[in-house]
Image (tube, helix red, strand yellow):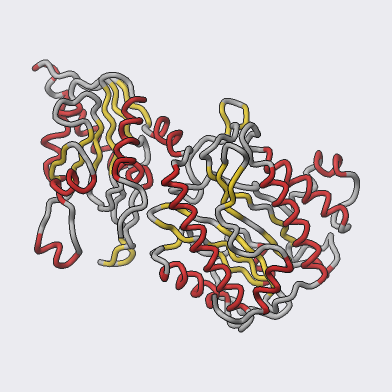
Amino acid sequence: MASMIPIKEFADRRRKLMDRMATDSIAILPAAPERVRNRDVLHPFRQDSDFHYLTGFGEPEAVLVLIPGREHGEAVLFCKERNPEKELWDGFLAGPEGAIERYGLDDAFPIADIDDILPGMIEGRSRVYYPLGKDHAFDNQVMDWVKVIRSKVRAGAHPPGEFVALEHLLHDMRLYKSAAEIKVMAKAGQISAEAHRHAMKRARRGGHEFNLEAELIHTFMEHGARSTAYPSIVGGGANGCILHYIENSAPLKDGDLVLIDAGCELECYASDITRTFPVSGKFSPEQKALYEVVLAAQYQAIDAVRPGNHWNHPHEAALKVLTQGLIDLGLLTGTLDDAMTAEAYKPFFMHRTGHWLGLDVHDVGDYKVGDAWRELEPGMALTVEPGLYIAPDNTDVEAKWRGIGIRIEDDVVVTKEGCRVLTDDVPKTIEDIEALMADQTRD
């Protein structure tokens, strides 16, 4: 399947990064390693997000090297050579020639030759950018290359004098999504929204949490998204109060809510949707009352996602609605100002209202610049996900509220005028959820 992001965009990203690098510097970035699942079975390979961002290259055992000003090509890839026998077992390899022809790299060499070639590329460069501390084995490998250069100082070699974390430059670039990236994320959001709709309908037939998880995965793959962006959360009843519940093995019970936090990954880009709905298809009065508070908080938070507002504005907007709602329902006492100052909401809402979204579900990018919250700008992508969780053992509230967990989450991109919700194809009002669940035909 052809990538939705053109090869030229990857080249433009490399050019932009090199323009930010110091004079006489070099950047070195390894691909993700393969990981053993058990014995001789590997986990499905997933490329390192930074490596993918700069190359679109999907193989392990590769290293990207960026050398501004290099006469024979500034963007160099070390990768596995073509090997017909190995490819018979494990599939197609691009090889150095394919890296240039298919991925637009300027130059490429076999990964087996990296120890012979890369020290010569590093030599004479004053600064080395690489992911410091991310991989202990790669740290040692970089130091081994530098030691080779240092061993030749008497012969006139010039080892680098400074090592800088590549993420300082690269992750700020990743924070701003291009039109092509937003297109991929919107498609991932549409696939995930359809999966959530199918799961809502499937819940009426009962079964277990894993039956709904199966519905999600089936829909993801049916539309070309081969993996989840993170382990799916399917929490029925009190399990919905466990923020990162992934056991997904309990039976679904009439009268309970189900909280599903799940999203597919498409071309390495994540989607992230949460919906909460009743197994029976109808909300109880208590469930409805709490749900309306969370939904109102999400609407207020989404309204606060706009250029000129800072990162914390959506969270502050949601907190006020959630806290006032808890007071109105008798779950908190006192005034809104007093409850906010005392953080009285924390037993019921203990997480932030969102996070950056992109190649990682909790994507890279600073939330503060210095001591100030970062200002929202067009192209930034984030989630908006307020919630309320009434623990089953919370004896400070009436029994009728206990064990209810509700979260509503959508993916949002900041635009010039405000924001665009990428995941609004799945119902979230009480009326729309109940109507969808009453309709037992499949989409």
Position of 28 with respect to 291 (left or right) is left
Image quarter in which the C terminus is found? bottom right
Quadrant in the rendering for residue 218 = bottom left
Q: Judge whether 127 appears above or below 34 on screen.
A: above
In the depicted view, which residue is nearer to us: 81 or 412?
412
Q: Quadrant of residue 404?
A: bottom right
- Quadrant the N terminus occupies: bottom left
Residue 137, x across and y down, in percent: 28, 43
x, y (%) of residue 110? 13, 45
**In percent of the image, x 69 and y 50: which residue is there?**
350
Q: Is residue 140 above or below residue 1?
A: above
Question: Of all residues shown, which one is farthest toward the front?
Answer: 417
In this orientation, which residue lies closer to the viewer: 143 or 51? 51
Residue 102 screen position, x and y as percent: 21, 48
x and y, in percent, of residue 392 in the image: 74, 66
Q: Residue at x 14, y 19 (%)?
A: 157
Q: Residue at x 47, y 71 (%)?
A: 219
Q: Quadrant of residue 88?
A: bottom left
